[in-house]
Image (cartoon, helix red, strand yellow):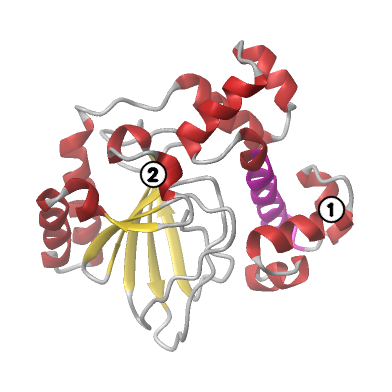
């Protein structure tokens, strides 16, 4: 979920360790600019993260609109982003309860979360903190199930924009009602909402890849009906106009 429209510093991603790659899609760090003021806009991406910030761990749940967490100037923030559908096997709480919320991991895992946060804080370098973070979660990965293959497939295909929900229902052998229920259980919201969010993410991806493209071309490439459709959806999901989002991306 930590996918910033306005990054306010240096954001980087890496592949997780081999022990974690079935459960987490990336490890990331965000070095907040030393002169940063106010919140950072984090736009919906259909994902859930475990985030270390301010010496504590919390779960950043899936969003349906931009989150605006307050961050301190110069802060170092670390995160591990779950593979689509994996979080439900780790967190022990219904995923819909996490939508739009940031929950202290200690509320879910108790003292184990506090001990892991302390080990991360005790590390002297950014690299060592990331290693402590990964090692702590890797120690738990052997007793966690991976994501459901059919829900991982749903996320992948919706992200690519190459199949309609009706086609996916037929391919997965699920009724529309069952698909919606499974999607809510897995991602926190129904497949139609997930489709909207992943289409928005395609817009961001196309904008980064083709910074000279106009909004009409980006709308078509991302799968919107037209530029007006793009404008409405970007405003609903991010709180910004498409032009402002492109400015923040540096496009």
Q: Residue at x 64, y 47 (%)?
A: 197
User: Is residue 251 among what the camera can see?
Assistant: no
Q: Earlier in the sequence, mark 1 or mark 2?
A: 2
- State the SS at label 2: loop
> What secondary structure prevails in the magenta region?
helix
Q: Please state the horizontal and vertical placement of residue 213, each as a whole percent of the image.
A: 82, 59
Numbered disc total? 2
Q: Find residue 229 and name its label.
A: 1
Q: Is residue 106 magenta?
A: no
How far apart are the alpha carbons under marks 1 and 2? 34 Å
Q: Residue at x 65, y 33 (%)?
A: 158
- 102 left or right of 163 in image: left
Q: Nearer the viewer, mark 1 or mark 2?
A: 1
Q: Which residue is mark 2?
A: 15
From what the image shows, is residue 241 above or below residue 135? below
Contact between labelled residues 2 and 1, with CB atoms less than 8 Å apart: no
Q: Is residue 203 magenta?
A: yes
Q: Residue at x 33, y 43 (%)?
A: 16
From what the image shows, is residue 239 above or below residue 133? below
From what the image shows, is residue 251 above or below residue 2? below
Q: Please state the horizontal and vertical placement of residue 194, each as a whole percent of the image.
A: 61, 40
- 125 left or right of 36 in image: left
Q: Please state the horizontal and vertical placement of residue 215, each as a whole percent of the image.
A: 84, 60
User: Is residue 39 among what the camera can see?
Assistant: yes
**To which quarter of the image does residue 58 belong?**
bottom left
Q: Please state the horizontal and vertical placement of residue 247, each as a whole percent of the image.
A: 70, 73
Q: Split into 4 quadrants, where in the image is the C terminus? A: bottom right
Within 10 Å of the Cα at label 1, are there few (<14), some (14-19), or many (20+) other Cα atoms? few
- Name the one closer to the observer, 77 or 189: 189
Magenta-tinted stretch: 195-211
Within 10 Å of the Cα at label 2, are there few (<14), some (14-19), or many (20+) other Cα atoms? few
């Amino acid at each position: 979920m930590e996918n910033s429209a306005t990054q306010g510093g240096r954001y980087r991603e890496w592949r997780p360790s081999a022990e974690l790659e079935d459960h987490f899609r990336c490890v990331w760090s965000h070095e907040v600019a030393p002169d940063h003021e106010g919140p950072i806009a984090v736009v919906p991406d259909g994902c859930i993260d475990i985030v270390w910030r301010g010496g504590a761990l919390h779960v950043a749940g899936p969003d349906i609109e931009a989150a605006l967490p307050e961050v301190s100037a110069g802060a170092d923030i670390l995160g591990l982003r779950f593979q689509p559908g994996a979080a439900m096997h780790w967190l022990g709480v219904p995923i819909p309860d996490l939508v739009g919320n940031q929950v202290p991991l200690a509320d879910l895992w108790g003292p184990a979360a506090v001990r892991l946060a302390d080990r991360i804080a005790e590390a002297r370098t950014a690299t060592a903190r990331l290693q402590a973070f990964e090692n702590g979660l890797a120690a738990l990965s052997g007793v966690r199930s991976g994501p459901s293959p059919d829900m991982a497939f749903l996320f992948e295909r919706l992200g690519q924009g190459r199949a309609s929900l009706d086609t996916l229902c037929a391919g997965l052998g699920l009724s529309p009602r069952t698909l919606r229920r499974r999607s809510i259980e897995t991602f926190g919201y129904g497949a139609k909402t997930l489709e909207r969010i992943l289409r928005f993410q395609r817009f961001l991806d196309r904008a980064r890849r083709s910074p000279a493209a106009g909004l009409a071309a980006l709308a078509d490439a991302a799968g919107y009906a037209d530029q007006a459709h793009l404008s409405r959806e970007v405003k609903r999901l991010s709180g910004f106009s498409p032009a402002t989002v492109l400015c923040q991306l540096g496009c």
